[in-house]
Amino acid sequence: MDLINGTADATRRDVLKTAASAITAVLLASGVSPALAQAAVQANFAVTGRFTRSTVAETARELAASPFKPLDASLPEVLAQLTYDQYRDIRFKPEMAVWANTGLPFQMQLFHRGFYYKEPVEVAIVENGEAQHLSYNPDMFSLGPLVPKPVPTEDIGFSGIRLHGPINRPDYYDEIVVFQGASYFRSLGKGQIYGLSARALAIKTGDPEGEEFPLFRAFWVETPVAGSETCVVHALLDSPSATGAYRFTVRPGMPTLMDVEAQLFPRVDLQRIGLAPGTSMFFFSPNGRENVDDFRPQVHDSDGLLMVTGRGERLWRPLANPSDLQISAFVDRSPRGFGLIQRDRDFESYQDLEAAYERRPSLFVEPVGDWGPGAVTLVEIPTNAEIHDNIVAFWSPQETIPAGSEYSYAYRLAWGGEPGMALGSAVVHATRSGRADIGQPTPERLFVIDYTFAAGVDRAKLGAPKATVNASKGTIRNVVIHDNPAIQGLRVSFQLDPQNEPLIELRANLTFETGAPAETWVYRWTA
């Protein structure tokens, strides 16, 4: 136990305060102005001092013992009312990046506070078991002509961090991962551009009383080792319901992998939470173009939810932009993986030269260990524009996590293309739907599902295919299987008579005489 002034019962916060006072005294003795000396130690969490693997968990545990205190997000007037264009005119200077010109495999840049990003985030750099608080300095940023001046010189903190590395070519450090805004972060694979995001924790998503958004209050970033392929980021989570300690091990590539280790410290009983949440955008596709007047065939960051159950069944659920909020739960135990996937990689499917939706990453979650009983939950929110993230997917534990307890879990995130887990014989290539008979007063719906064969599968050895379609309500008829030479696959079509039902759950299974079954297609149809 650490001894401070001869006592052995000091809390970790007392230790940090004493260390901060000592550092201030050293800075003042060195001729640094009092204002700058205070700025250098203004952090409450990411302070200069000893750092171990348990530091963030100890901080989160202590923080959870007290009621939640909202962050002071106040800013000087010059920054408080920044517009979107003004905020974008504040740019970090690449030459000021942490580890710039060191030859290390990563560099770190910081985000300024302002616009939507008013909450302060503390940052520290960790090396050889010591953390060094990183203070805000306006000289880190170039301020364009749109930015009101003067900006503050005191330590106002940052709004987030981003890591850069030579992911696409060896002579240029591209963005690899961004942590900014609440507990949101995003990454991408080699050759891709940003699309969907992840979060550390979802609380009360889709709840009529409103969602709770936990936020990262501090980051500790380990100095990367020369020649290493990984960079480690520690983060402190805080919210009215819980605190948390997170450790991200980032490995860029195709896909970019993140190993996530998390500990939660609930302030209240956690009953409606989401682990490993992903957040994306789905506007429309060939399966949902009702009331769409757009030159583009499709607009989305993700086109489906992929789930591999604990029993190894592979489910594909095409996404929808519903007229009303809808929540789907896929009950399971110890799932092998789930995620929001951008499966269509053809520019012809989007025709958007600027957005380049075909280059958006998929995000797949692989739980580590036994996550027990629960459900993969999909939340689909109506949207009338592509600027809104309206899709959320996460794991909902069945058990309540009681207040005052500690809950640990781990998982791997893969940012990139299609995960190869449990491919089976064939996967869903595309889903389309429309009216089956224009002349009917209550027209039937026609669904068309295209399948492609998985790599390495010899179709000739699979034998004859068989399709079975089930509906929770209404009537299914005319289930037909065709060869689809355009994609060297199969097409399954069927008609649904809704019989005036407002909501119907659909499930299609494609099997063969021999070999593994195809991906299971599931869908929720709404009137």
Image: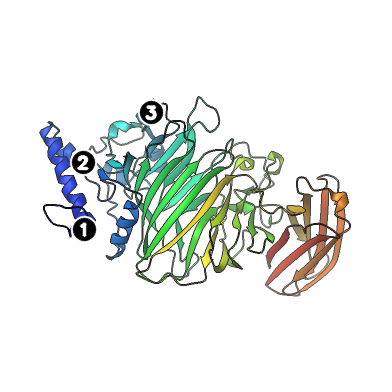
In the displayed structure, does residue 162 sit left or right of residue 374?
left
Disc marking residue 11: 1
Bin the neighbour count of mark 1 within 10 Å (Cα to Cα): few under 14, some 14-19, many 20 and up.
few
Find the distance from the CA under tag 2 to the CA under tag 3: 23 Å
Q: Quadrant of residue 114?
A: top left
Pointer 3 residue: 100
Residue 143, by quadrant, is top left
Is residue 374 depicted above or below 214 in this figure?
below
| Camera sees residue 108 | yes
Q: Pick whichever of labels 2 and 3 is earlier in the sequence.
A: 2
Residue at left 30%, top 36%?
148
Residue 181: give its label: none
* Lateral position of residue 208 relative to residue 70, left or right: right
| Residue 443 shows in this picture | no
**Mark 1 or mark 2: whose residue is earlier in sequence:** 1
Three-letter amino acid code of the residue under disc 1: Thr
Density class for disc 3 (Cα within 10 Å; few <14, some 14-19, many ≥20) is some
Viewer-proximal residue among 113 and 481: 481
Which residue position is annotated with label 2? 39
For marks 1 and 3, the one nearer the N-term is 1
Q: Position of residue 59 (x, y in %)?
A: 30, 56
Q: Amino acid at mark 3?
A: Ala
- Helix, strand or loop for disc 1: loop
Which-is-in-front pick, marks 2 and 3? Answer: 3
Image quadrant where one finds the C terminus: bottom right
Q: Secondary structure at mark 2?
A: helix
For the point 17% across and 53% down, which residue is it? 3
